[in-house]
């Protein structure tokens, strides 16, 4: 059998129980021969097990398949994967083939050399026994006598992370497990070792992902709570303001904080993602604006209508939309209506494959302009321009006001440098 390089030899010496090392250590007698049909059958079994291991997410299913292919490939009646439990100095039958009910998951064996699996574990080498009853130094667990086991073949299951257990095939009559059987078992043990390590890696990654998702969600909760605290302070300062101009400016800041807080509230109720489904967000925003402005105490109705097929927008775009829509609604509530009240409609639709259109319409007395010193609409126009959109107005005295916001579904996420530097 051809040997590897000096580097390979050094690696094998450091890890004598590896699949490669065990296979290279196997030597057939000069005149030993095997059936070509058996070789084909075993290679087919290896190919099928390899494919199953790649597609099968459950480790228990992979171990069960390994036992079945090992028993059939070695023409044995029984097979089992013994998982080593270091804390108990014992093996647990983790998976099996051919055994009576109650063996898999329950039967145990010591990890001492008093049984074939323990001998393979201690030596880190394949162990084949013609007749287990003839071994005077064996102290076999009940599973052997219960199933009338006579001959046994065992190979260690060792991966780069260390020793997992032993793959064992057993038969109720005396028989010699040959080189072909041993190499098949070693190869199957290698697939099992890789599957165990892959499952452990995936489990560790899944645990890390879940931990990160939990931390992110906790972060959202903290940010949302901070928004609510800041908003309460801003409202307190607005009530304590000594001039109408100061109160109006503080209220405008509060409205923007409210819009951001609403987005975080919406994100907390959905899967954490960098995309937000527009329909759900606008519906939630309208509900929160109704509560924020206490519309149940005023003769003003706020309605939200959206397309059935709602696009998903990035968080920055939804944040900007929320701030602008809230600003326009607040402006209508402050200036559009008499004591008789009225209605405000927010209508969102997809204009074409690239744009989303949101209209904010009221049936009030028409746009009268904003109070001196108000920065709300100026900020709204600037925000929309930052995301590559537009804001247009249509109004007639006594016939209401209609604002149209057009935003692209995909856009650059950073505002222009000159826009960032613009004064408020």
Image: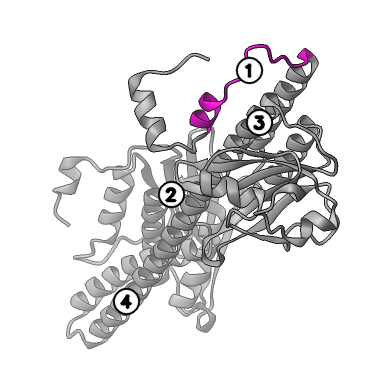
Q: Position of residue 339 (x, y in %)?
A: 47, 79
* Residue beneath the point at 75% across and 35% down: 69
Q: Nearer the viewer, mark 2 or mark 3?
A: 3
Q: Which residue is mark 3?
A: 182
* Residue beneath the point at 19% across and 45% down: 419
Closer to us: 240 or 245: 240
Closer to us: 87 or 170: 170
Closer to us: 74 or 152: 152
* Gap in angstroms between the C-alphas marked 2 and 4: 25 Å
- The numbered mark, 1 or 4, whose residue comes first in the sequence reads 1
Q: Nearer the viewer, mark 2 or mark 1?
A: 1
Q: Are the residues tagged 2 and 3 within 8 Å (C-beta)?
A: no
Q: Is residue 68 above or below residue 380?
A: above
* Gap in angstroms between the C-alphas marked 1 and 4: 85 Å
* Magenta-colored span: 19-36
Is residue 236 part of the magenta span, yes or no?
A: no
* Gap in angstroms between the C-alphas marked 2 and 1: 64 Å
- The numbered mark, 2 or 3, whose residue comes first in the sequence reads 3
Q: Is residue 94 above or below residue 300?
A: above
Q: Is residue 401 visible?
A: no
- The numbered mark, 2 or 4, whose residue comes first in the sequence reads 4
Q: Are the residues tagged 2 and 4 within 8 Å (C-beta)?
A: no
Q: Position of residue 323 (x, y in %)?
A: 36, 59
- The numbered mark, 4 or 3, whose residue comes first in the sequence reads 3
Q: Nearer the viewer, mark 3 or mark 1?
A: 1
- For residue 274, the mark is 2
- Label 4 secondary element: helix
Q: Which residue is mark 4?
A: 231
Q: Is residue 236 above or below residue 167?
A: below
């Amino acid at each position: 059998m051809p040997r590897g390089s000096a580097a390979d030899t050094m690696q094998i010496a450091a890890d004598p129980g590896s699949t490669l090392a065990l296979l290279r250590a196997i030597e057939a007698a000069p005149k030993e021969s095997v059936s070509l049909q058996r070789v084909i059958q075993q290679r087919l079994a290896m190919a099928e097990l390899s494919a199953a291991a790649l597609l099968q997410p459950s480790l228990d299913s992979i171990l069960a398949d390994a036992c079945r292919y090992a028993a059939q490939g070695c023409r044995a009646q029984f097979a089992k994967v013994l998982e080593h439990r270091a804390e108990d100095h014992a093996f647990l039958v983790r998976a099996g083939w051919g055994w009576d009910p109650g063996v898999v998951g329950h039967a145990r064996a010591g990890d001492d050399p008093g049984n074939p699996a323990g001998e393979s574990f201690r030596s880190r080498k394949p162990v084949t026994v013609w007749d287990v009853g003839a071994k005077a130094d064996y102290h076999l667990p009940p599973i052997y006598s219960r199933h009338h086991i006579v001959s046994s073949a065992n190979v260690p299951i060792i991966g780069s992370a260390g020793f997992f257990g032993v793959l064992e095939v057993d038969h109720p009559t005396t028989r010699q497990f040959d080189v072909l059987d041993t190499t098949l078992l070693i190869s199957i043990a290698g697939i099992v070792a890789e599957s165990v390590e892959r499952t452990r890696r995936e489990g560790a990654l899944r645990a890390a992902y879940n931990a990160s998702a939990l931390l992110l969600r906790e972060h959202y909760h903290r940010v949302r709570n901070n928004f609510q605290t800041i908003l309460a302070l801003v409202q307190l300062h607005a009530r304590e303001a000594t001039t109408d101009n100061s109160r109006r400016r503080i209220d405008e800041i509060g409205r923007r904080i409210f819009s951001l807080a609403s987005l975080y509230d919406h994100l907390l109720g959905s899967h954490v993602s960098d995309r937000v489904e527009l329909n759900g967000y606008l519906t939630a925003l309208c509900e929160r604006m109704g509560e924020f402005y206490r519309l149940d105490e005023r003769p003003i109705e706020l309605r939200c209508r959206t397309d059935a097929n709602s696009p998903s927008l990035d968080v920055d775009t939804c944040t900007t939309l929320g701030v602008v829509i809230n600003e326009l609604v607040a402006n209508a509530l402050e200036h559009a209506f008499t004591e008789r009240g009225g209605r405000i409609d927010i209508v969102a639709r997809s204009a074409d494959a690239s744009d989303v259109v949101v209209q904010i319409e009221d049936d009030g007395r028409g746009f009268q302009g904003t109070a001196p010193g108000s920065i709300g609409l100026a900020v709204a126009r600037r925000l929309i321009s930052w995301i590559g959109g537009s804001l247009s107005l249509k109004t007639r005295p006594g016939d209401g006001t209609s604002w149209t916001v057009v935003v692209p579904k995909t856009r650059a996420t950073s505002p222009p440098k000159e826009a960032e530097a613009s004064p408020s």
